[in-house]
Amino acid sequence: MKTTEKRTTQKATVLTSLALFCAVFAALLFVATFYDLQISRLLTKGILAPGEYDTNNTFGAFFEIIGDSPVEIMLAFSIDIIFVYAFRLCSKAKRAVLMAISGAFSVAPGYVFCLIVFNRLKPHILYGSNAQLTSGAFLHLTYLFFGVLFAVLGILAVNNFSDDSLRVLVRFAVATIVFAAVSTIAINLGFKDAFGRLRYRAMNVNPNDPVTGFPAYSRWYELKGHSVSDEIMMSVFGHTDANKSFPSGHTGAAGTSYALIMLNSTLKPKKKSVRVLFWVIPVVFTGLVAVSRIIVGAHFMSDVLMGGTFSFVLMMLSREIFIFKGENIKSIFKK
């Protein structure tokens, strides 16, 4: 009897959560579909001057620089988990293979993080200046040094977990790697090129131009492909990503922080305040990144909504498959 009641309660919870999520998403998408342009005009006012493509707004610059860092942070944590799990709990044959693979990749997130932060910081440091910053082999060696340092510190931190915790954390690690990889590849290498949507700040440069100005504005669901050539984009904007507005890669990457929700389900912390924080932190962070991308004219509301939602849905699917092993989906169809 208790099992039946528990199953009924679980089914009701799952269905209610799905209905609430769909209702909120549908409402936000409705607003974004019909008021994208007006929302961008309102939020960029006083920040993006007419004829301007780039802005040095502090809020926008900060989240542009660190907004997609959850990808590197969560991947680093996951790879370190696999490395320590292999070292402590795997047989000799598996240990050698897993440690070699995870060890080789453990340096990459820290290296990429430093590389991205520097390259994103550089335009803001040089904004309105003729100065130049040093680049070259020395910088890459510096990135590599910090990559190694982050990997070592991460492995030492993960090594503090008990064997029992590592056994469940390895499922979290696999789920995070799959979810982060699929989200990043799909958004940046798939959807952006297919939709080919011009950014608000691109149209802001020559607002009356029929090809690159506001007459070329399109709604999020229109597939325009590569309608503006790289040559035109470079000559007009000085960038080749002016038609990669939909969906927002930054917001999708920020959504990798939703892995904290999977971590919450994996470790099951006893304190309610900790469990709440594991939900609040990624939602607030992703929301701030989303707003920052609109106010600098890099994206429309529908772009950031789709980018963040896509990551959230992928995270929930990964959590269901790797951590819950499909029990929530099964509860919907069980009588």
Image: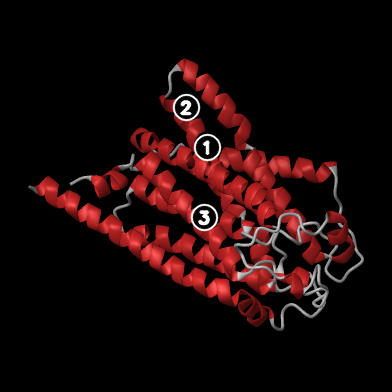
Tell me the element at label 3: helix
Residue most toward the left?
Answer: 1
Q: Residue 318's spot in the image, x, y percent?
A: 43, 44
What residue is shown at x 86% (from left), y 57% (from top)?
133
Tell me the quarter of the picture where residue 294 sits: bottom right
Q: Which of 198 and 74 is in front in this view?
A: 198
Check disc 1 and give the amino acid type.
Asp
Check disc 3 and give the amino acid type.
Phe
Q: Earlier in the sequence, mark 1 or mark 3?
A: 1
Q: Viewer-nearest of labels 3 and 2? A: 3
Residue most toward the top?
Answer: 93
Residue 221 in sight: yes
Check disc 2 and give the amino acid type.
Ala
Q: Do the residues labelled 3 and 2 touch (CB within 8 Å)?
A: no
Tell me the element at label 1: helix
Q: Residue 284's spot in the image, x, y percent?
A: 49, 66
Left or right: residue 64 versus residue 129 is: left
Left or right: residue 179 versus residue 325 is: right
- Residue on which the image places disc 3: 310
Vertical comparison of 234 with 146: above or below: below
Residue most toward the right?
Answer: 130
Vertical comparison of 149 with 250: above or below: above
Neighbour class for label 2 at 10 Å: few (<14), some, many (≥20)? many
- Residue on which the image places disc 2: 86
- Residue on which the image places disc 1: 80
What residue is shown at x 89% (from left), y 69% (from top)?
129
Left or right: residue 244 versus residue 206 is: left
Q: Nearer the viewer, residue 78 or 254?
A: 254
Residue 289 in sight: no
Vertical comparison of 244 with 138: above or below: below
What residue is shown at x 10% (from left), y 48% (from top)?
2
Tell me the element at label 2: helix
